Image: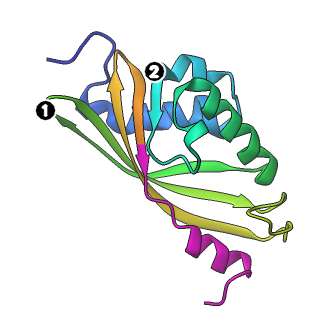
């Protein structure tokens, strides 16, 4: 049985959309406090210091919004599974223009879109854990900094 405040499986797509819109698509870094568990764990973080807690997420989002000022996630698909834990899954399409330094690459101003499957463990209505499969190679190719 889910805990109080946990999204129901049939409402997974609206939950994913609301989470994306309220926080990341509006660039509202403070929404992390509302959307994430205090002991949040980001398994997809590129550096250990950004994996644990809300402070790491806020730092990553500040960087992300500087490099990609028009950043947004659009949801292509969403599903849920109930077992020993509630899980949320969404295929997000990340869309933006490259306007800041990225991995030592100066801004090229090109737009790109890549799919990013993401998984979430939700506890007490907040994201407790996050996993993602990023397509950095596809992004670099679209930006013209890697050969196709």
Q: Position of residue 94 (x, y in %)?
A: 58, 56
The residue positioned 68% from the left and 83% from the top of the image is 146
Q: Dividing the picture into quarters, in which one does residue 125 lie?
A: top left
Residue at (68% x, 39% y) in the render: 61
**Mark 2 and mark 1: Cα distance apart in space:** 21 Å
Residue marked by disc 1: 83
Which circle marks residue 39 in the picture?
A: 2
Left/right placement of residue 86 relative to residue 93 reads left
Q: Nearer the viewer, residue 49 or 32?
A: 49
Colouring rule applied to residues: rainbow
Count of residue discs: 2
Of label 2 and label 1, which has the lower sequence position? 2
Could you tell me which residue is drawn at 84 percent across and 68 percent down? 109
Q: Is residue 137 magenta?
A: yes
Looking at the rendering, the stretch of residues picked out in magenta corresponds to 131-148
Instruction: Name the spot of residue 83 as percent of width and height, x first.
Output: 13, 32
Q: Which one is in front, 48 or 38?
A: 48
């Amino acid at each position: 049985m889910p805990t109080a405040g946990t999204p129901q499986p049939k409402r997974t797509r609206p939950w994913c959309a609301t989470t994306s819109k309220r926080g990341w698509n509006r660039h509202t870094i403070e929404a992390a406090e509302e959307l994430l568990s205090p002991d949040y764990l980001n398994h997809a973080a590129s550096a250990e210091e950004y994996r644990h807690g809300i402070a790491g997420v806020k730092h990553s989002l500040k960087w992300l919004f500087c490099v990609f000022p028009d950043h947004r996630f659009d949801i292509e698909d969403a599903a849920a599974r109930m077992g020993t834990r509630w899980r949320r899954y969404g295929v997000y399409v990340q869309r933006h223009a490259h306007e800041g330094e990225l991995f030592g690459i100066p801004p090229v101003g090109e737009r790109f879109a890549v799919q990013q499957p993401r998984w979430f463990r939700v506890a007490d209505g907040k994201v407790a854990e996050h996993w993602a499969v990023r397509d950095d190679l596809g992004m670099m190719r679209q930006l013209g900094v890697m050969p196709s």
